[in-house]
Image (tube, rainbow, N blue to C red):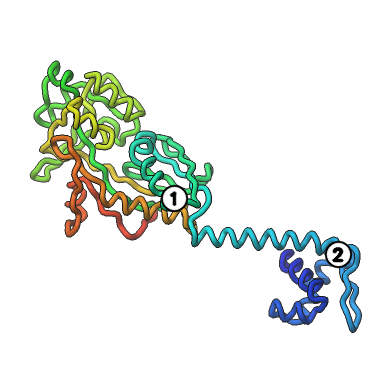
Amino acid sequence: MDRFIGMAVFAKVVEAASFSAAARHFGMSPAMVSKHVQALEERLGARLLNRTTRRVGVTEVGQEYYERARHILAEMEEAESAAGDEQTAPRGRLRVTTPVSFGTHELAPAIADYLAAYPDVSVDLSLDDPYIDLVERRFDLAIRLGDLPDSSLVARKLYALTTVVCASPVHLEKHGTPQTPADLAAHNCLVYTYATPQNIWTFVDQSGNEERVRVSGRIQANSGDALLALALKGEGILLAPDYIVEHDLKTGRLVRLLPDCVTHQVPVYAVYPHGRYLSAKTRTFIDFLAARCSHVPQIKSNGVKSVAGNAGKSADKAAIDGVQAPPAAVEHIRAV
């Protein structure tokens, strides 16, 4: 018989001084209550109750066991209550991982706004460019960029961010300005280590034709911010998410290139371990991000952001505009 059930039945018998009262409380027969108590005594190798036809008395060993059992049962009830509350009311620590640059520029400000709305939640943010094991490292979720590998995780697409090809005026004055995507093959390009594929930049022209260009350069790095610093020093042409280069495009420290070609859209996903229950803190954070991302502005050719109106547009058209409306449903990444 279940240890905790036996413990709870015994405790109720002691409190009510009655097998019948305990039976009514648990909705079982007095005979079943007696079996639970007998099984408990046999397992412990000690008599816990003295029984007569008129009354039930607890032995000295039974009284000591009851005191300990009462605390254990109270702790278990409190733990179950707390777990249930976390499913309905956001509270507790939320552990999130995301790439370094995205976490610094985009997710950190979003977390601050989320915490203002949910004061009972705290956040442990880990910035990691390589994918890490969410289950092994006990993360509640990850915000990941780009195409996802097959796994047993669950993913919800938040939006698709815009990437921008740009370079410093110093670089362009020295090496010339590329007029077509194919011209990039002759330029020194700054390559992001974790891009997939690493050396292929994809463009779509105004007619919808896709062109994939193999780029190369003397420098590659695993940090978007490091590549930005190099681009500002005139070291090459950069393909970067708009949130990294927005400020420098506005100030003229960088110049946007090939404005008539749409660069590859990078999907942004909220990813979390598969399970039956999703805690309220995780669920509300994902919903918060989805609502926030539905209003992400896009960079125009002059480097100024404007909110793209997605209402009434198809998903494909929204993606071309640089904003992907978040879907209501989640999808499983295929298990390998």
Q: Secondary structure at mark 1?
A: strand
1 relative to 171 in the view: left or right: right
Q: In the image, which disc is placed on residue 63?
A: 2
Residue plotted at (37% across, 35% down)? 104
| Disc 1 residue type (three-letter) | Tyr
Residue at mark 1:
272
Which corner quadrant of the image does residue 251 belong to? top left
In the rendered image, is residue 255 in sight? yes
Q: Position of residue 72 (x, y in %)?
A: 73, 59
Q: Nearer the viewer, residue 216 or 19?
A: 19
Q: Position of residue 12 (x, y in %)?
A: 76, 72
Residue plotted at (22% across, 34% down)? 201
| Disc 2 residue type (three-letter) | Gln
Q: Position of residue 79 (x, y in %)?
A: 63, 58
Residue plotted at (27% across, 19% down)? 218
- Image quarter (top left, top right, bottom left or bottom right) of the N terminus: bottom right
Tell me: residue 212, above or below residue 290: above
What distance separates the C-alpha of mark 2 from that of mark 1?
47 Å
Q: In the image, which disc is placed on residue 2?
A: none
Earlier along the polypeptide chain: callout 2 or callout 1?
2
